[in-house]
Amino acid sequence: MAMLEINDIHTYYGNIHALKGISLTVEEGEIVTLIGANGAGKTTTLRTISGLLTPREGSISYLGNDITGVPAHDLVYQRMAMVPEGRGVFAKLTVQENLEMGAYSRNDKEGIARDFERVFELFPRLKERRKQVAGTLSGGEQQMLATGRAMMTSPRLLMLDEPSMGLAPVLVDAVFDAIVEINKEGTTILLVEQNALMALSIANRGYVLQTGQIVLHDDAAALKQNEMVQKAYLGMD
Amino acid sequence: MFNTLQEKFPLIQKFALLGGIVAIYLTAVGVVITFSLRNLIGTFVSLGHVFLVLGAVGAGVLIAQQFKDEDDASTYVAGFLTGAMSSVSLILFNIVVQLFVVQASEEGVFHLREMFVNFSPDSLAFLTFGQGFLFGNVLLFFLFGLMGLLGVSFIRLPEKIRRGWINGLIWVFSVGLFSENVSQVIRELFKYSGTSFNKILFTQKALNPVAAIVLFALTFAFGYMGIKTATSQKWAAMPVEKQKTGRIVITVMAVIFVAALPWLVGLFLSQALFIIGMYVMMGLGLNIVVGYAGLLDLGYVAFFAFGAYTMGILTTTGVLGRSDLNFWTALPFAMLVGVLWGVLLGFPVLRMRGDYLAIVTLGFGEIIRILALSNWLAPLGGGAQGVLHIPQPEFFGLSMNSPQAMYYLVVLGAVLAAFVTIRLRDSRLGRQWMAMREDEDVAEAMGINLVQTKLLAFSIGAAFSALAGSIFAARLGNIFPHSFNILISINALALIIVGGLGSIPGVVVGAIILIGLPEMLREFAEYRLLMYGILLIIMMIVKPDGFMPEARRRQEIKDEKDFLTEQAAKSEG
């Protein structure tokens, strides 16, 4: 049974039909990526899964439970974490406090201490800056912090929304290396990216979204060779 | 020197113009002439004089900052020039008044004063120091030059002298301004010998000139020797054990001081202290809603009104009475009503953020006031007649009918509010609020229940406001709908911003500045809002984090500065 199974969901913003029947699955241990142009519905899909939006039709099941309509703050306790678009760090809290907020849902002191170490291993930059206010970090450091904070919830499924957005190429590499590292340690990843090439090079499978519908689904390697994908998203002729 | 001055002359012109605009504005709106009634030193220096020269002094300060790298002589000359030139606007003012008001005949076609009330012979006489038109204006010119020098001196004097100089001036100004209150305290402290002591110190409700000089000399010496810095250095050098006992001693002294305060300052100021305390309570409550949870609430007065009306209706001996509860037994109900309405207001605005929330809460506050005024609710709350005959609280059979007794009640309430606020801030709930303030989506993604968190902020804030409201009702004995206008919300919000958003000592400081000072300067109530506005604008520019910023905000602003300098260094390198 798949870890996350989405069945024909329709999500609306007011009267605007944003998701027109999306179905996808994520297996435990995988990296799955959603690629597509601006406005295709990638972020909406993530927000719907994480409970920030409620679908009008369709169902979502996670670890065998139906989670359709369960609010975001409850899903954290089912070990599903999300790094929102635009990073969304708590700008006025320090790095340390941001990470502590990540562990808000937990009570196991030892586990939290262990995860602190783990996050600092993944992102040594955060350790150097642990006393600094998060709003003054660089874009790349903020992305690291947001990812690290999500890791502090000790998730089984980590969803990332556009982690490469607005970052210098060298930092994009660092962030993606960390994502691969996190996945190796056993966390399943659902990744939304505009940088399709980058996303497909680390993912196992990929879904291509267009105006609220999935138009293509295949192994990442196969998608990379797909003519349509190459033309539309990888900028090749 | 001449070259520097020539080179920087545009700056001098600019600041002189600025100072001139400030001076003519304060004169034309009547601040200067009204405040000239409040003497500071003898009958020579009044608060009006201070406002008159404010622009020139400010211009001097600005010039000194711009002349940082220049030599002393040219800086002082520049300061004098700036100050003197800023008097030009006032000299023009004098000429206009002389021509169109003083010399204009009765049948004159053009009556300036019909439009500008303060273009009056009185103003002219004040601005020329009663020395006649010609000599008076020359005097004004040179005086403003000296004031420019004064402004420069605040920046330019050698450190020790500068410290003494500023210290002395501040002391003389404050004691002069509050001479009535100071003499009251001296009278209470020393009884009969105090009265004769006061006769030496004060004349005409102002400092005696000789006493002013002595006071200045003393405080100058204190500043010069740097008593304050020396003490703080000694304190830092003390072992931790000693610091601990020292802290206890200071706390005990502070408690004694707060307890003795109403007996020292007399009845009128006790009333002012009571009002300050009430606003501290409200400010602490609003601080939770705005400072911690980041929900901009402009209808905070509504909860104050609920507290007051609940207390009034439950305890009144008049026709509206619904029960025979007394103050203490009605208090929990008043707070409970506040909490319930906090939740009720909270529900519809759960999905609103920022500006939208502010507008809705603003409307809510007005609705409550209009409902209280309406005939429809008159059987319950008395409509425009309000609730009368609310008994004062009793304490073991003693009626607390003096401002002093009520002061203690309000201090108790404020201490309780501060304690609860501190404990909440450091709790899980406090963290929830701060996370929500920063980013609602992320907070939710971290497992924070936003509905619960928001409603708790609204209802706890409302409880403190209701507490303040019920004490207010019991103190006044009767309440009317128009006591609960929007100005109370604005006051509460302004005081936490001026004090420093999120900071608890800041609330106290803000309340003293924004509520206490206007109470002490009652005779100038008509300029209250003007001063308010000016103070808020200056605060936002000069000290955007408030007088006593929360430790976190201080850190944040420091980091931001470090960040900016780092960036600047990078872009240069």
Image: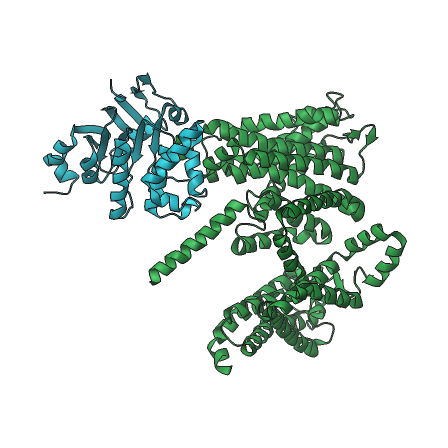
Chain colours: A cyan, B green
Residue at 34% across / 43% down in the picture?
A: A124
As drawn, B46 above or below A91:
below
Horizontal and vertical percent position of residue B431: 49, 35
| Res. A90 visible in picture | yes
Is residue B369 among what the camera can see?
Answer: no
Image vertical order of residue B561 relative to residue B406, above or below? below
Q: Position of residue A40 (x, y in %)?
A: 24, 34
> Going 54% across and 78% down the picture, which residue do you hit?
B74
Q: Where residue B154 sits in the image (x, y, percent)?
A: 60, 67
Task: Please state if A136 lies on the left or on the right of B374 as rendered.
Answer: left
Give the image quarter of residue B425. top right
Q: How many marks?
A: 0
Q: Residue furthest bottom?
A: B2
In the picture, the quarter occupied by the C terminus of chain A is: top left
Is B186 or B62 nearer to us in this picture? Answer: B186
Query: On the rendered structure, is B361 left or right of B488?
Result: left
Where on the picture, by quarter, is residue B329? top right
Quadrant that contains the N terminus of chain A? top left
For this view, does B261 lie left or right of residue B440? right
Residue nearer the viewer, B17 or B421: B421
Give the percent coordinates (x, y) of residue B541.
52, 55
Quarter where residue B125 is shown: bottom right
